[in-house]
Image (spheres, rainbow, N blue to C red):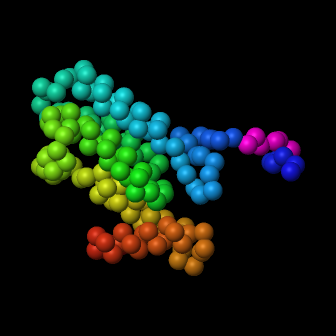
Amino acid sequence: CSPLTINNAIVPWVKKAKYLGVTLCSSKVFKCDWSESKKKFHTSTNTIIGRLGTTTSSPVLLKLFKTQAVPKLQYGIATMVLSKEEKKCFSFAYNSTFSKIYNTFDNNVIMCCQYYSNFLTFELLYDYHRYSFLLNLVRRSEISHKSELDRLDYNDFLKLKLRYKFNEN
């Protein structure tokens, strides 16, 4: 095969490529490598807890966690459908902070801590941001149920809308 070129420049074949901070992987299906996002998230979380300690007031730790670490974990994920495995990995990373702050490994206790601290579970947080992202595209007519390319996103939009009984207004 002749090499792929764009404007007379050869585009190299690579296993991974970074675009707008998201690492795309070569695969038969669309796939991303989220290890860098999780690494940045853990670095932020560990820095916060390492400098302040777990004896610091939990509302202070959680506010810093929410403003400094969570955006690093969420970067770019609202734009795509995550697999169950990806959601599980993200949830594990997200829950690990609550595990450290509240000194527990029990998932039920972690969920209660999230609830009483006014935090959503990772899956709910992802669904909310995914729906908001897709709603914005629908409102601007940038995705349509008529387009084959948009079908996956549009169906995901409808699925989220029905699951949570969201109103587009």
Left or right, 169 with respect to 23, comes to left
Q: In the orientation shown, which residue stands out farthest toward the bottom?
A: 146
Identified at 33% across, 59% down, the residue is 128
Tell me which corner region of the image, top left, top right, bottom left or bottom right, holds residue 51.
top left
Q: In the orientation shown, which residue stands out farthest toward the top?
A: 51
In the rendered image, the vertical position of residue 159 relative to residue 16, given as above or below: below
Where is residue 60? Give x, y as percent: 17, 33
Identified at 31% across, 55% down, the residue is 123
Q: Quadrant of the C terminus?
A: bottom left
Left or right, 32 with respect to 53, comes to right
Q: Is residue 12 magenta?
A: yes
In the rendered image, the vertical position of residue 86 relative to residue 50, given as above or below: below
Task: Decide which of 59, 34 is in the foreground and name it.
Answer: 34
Left or right, 146 with respect to 103, comes to right
In the rendered image, the vertical position of residue 22 relative to residue 56, given as above or below: below
Query: Principal SS element in the magenta part?
Result: loop
Tell me which corner region of the image, top left, top right, bottom left or bottom right, holds residue 78.
bottom left
In the rendered image, the vertical position of residue 37 relative to residue 4, given as above or below: above
Identified at 87% across, 49% down, the residue is 2
* Highlighted magenta segment, given as a residue range: 8-13
Q: Is residue 85 magenta?
A: no
Q: Is residue 132 visible?
A: no
Where is residue 75? Give x, y as percent: 44, 45
Q: Is residue 106 visible?
A: yes
Where is residue 35? Give x, y as percent: 46, 38
Where is residue 122? Give x, y as percent: 30, 51
Identified at 37% across, 46% down, the residue is 89
